[in-house]
Image: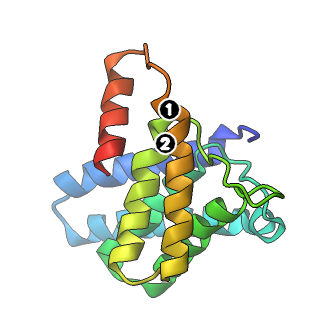
Amino acid sequence: MKKNFIPGLRLLVTLLVFARALAAADTPSFQQQLVSDLRRDVERLHRASAAERAANTAPKDFYFPYLLWGLINLHEKTGEPVLLDWAKEDLMWSVRFSIDADGKVKPFFANFRFYPTFCGAFNYLKAHGALTPAEIAQVAAQLVASTDTRLDRADFGAQNRGMLSGSAFRS
């Protein structure tokens, strides 16, 4: 996957600012501005990957899974139906482009850093009845493929990786 960090990094920063500011925001207009800013960014990023979705190729943006998190969090706040549609479209795209020519599911992500956001989007879409049983099975196969790449090796990294791995299994 080609690593283009800037668009995803902007979304991540927007999400972090959004989360912190919502906790501290004390005026409705400030909260609405945060929602508007996040809405603008998730729409821009969703539309920016339209050609990749159409070609069924991997996203150029390394941080693509965070877009899923932004979409479902914004849908939870606003209830705007198109956000749920976009989240489903992007989730299923990540499942589709991970299937090789022989029909074998390849891991979409080789580490657990994106696992919580991917699982969060999957669980949210499933809870809102946005996925068919066949789509649920396809996403589950992707989760198994991505998990299998990590179960057979020790992770000798710092504690933060252990925490990410643990939170991913909880999701």
Residue drawn at x 41%, y 56% is 119
Q: In this view, does 3 lie above or below 87?
A: above
Residue bearing the label numbered 1: 150
Residue bearing the label numbered 2: 147
> Marks 1 and 2: CB-CB under 8 Å?
yes
Local packing at callout 2 (Cα closer than 10 Å; few below 14, some 14-19, many 20+) is: many
Q: Is mark 1 on a helix, strand or loop?
A: helix
Q: Can residue 147 be seen in this view?
A: yes
Local packing at callout 1 (Cα closer than 10 Å; few below 14, some 14-19, many 20+) is: some
Q: From the top left corner, tell me how far across and down residue 135 is, in percent.
A: 54, 75
Q: Residue 165 falls in which quadrant of the image?
A: top left
Q: In this view, does 86 lie above or below 44?
A: below
Q: From the top left corner, tell me how far across and down residue 151 is, in percent.
A: 46, 32
Residue drawn at x 56%, y 35% is 149
Q: Is residue 28 left or right of residue 74?
A: left
The quarter of the image holding the N terminus is top right
Q: Which amino acid does label 2 sit on?
A: Thr
Q: What residue type is labelled 1?
A: Arg
Res 13 label: none
Task: Name the foreground residue: 69 vs 168.
Answer: 168
Q: Is mark 2 on a helix, strand or loop?
A: helix
Determine the CA span between mark 1 and mark 2.
6 Å
Q: Is residue 25 left or right of residue 5?
A: left
Residue drawn at x 74%, y 48% is 60
Q: In this view, does 155 lie to the left or right of 42?
A: left
Q: In this view, does 22 lie to the left or right of 43?
A: left
Q: From the top left corner, tell me how far across and down residue 6 is, in percent.
A: 64, 41
Colour scheme of the rendered structure: rainbow
Q: In this view, does 130 lie above or below 155?
A: below
Residue drawn at x 44%, y 19% is 155
Task: Name the foreground residue: 115 vs 136.
Answer: 136
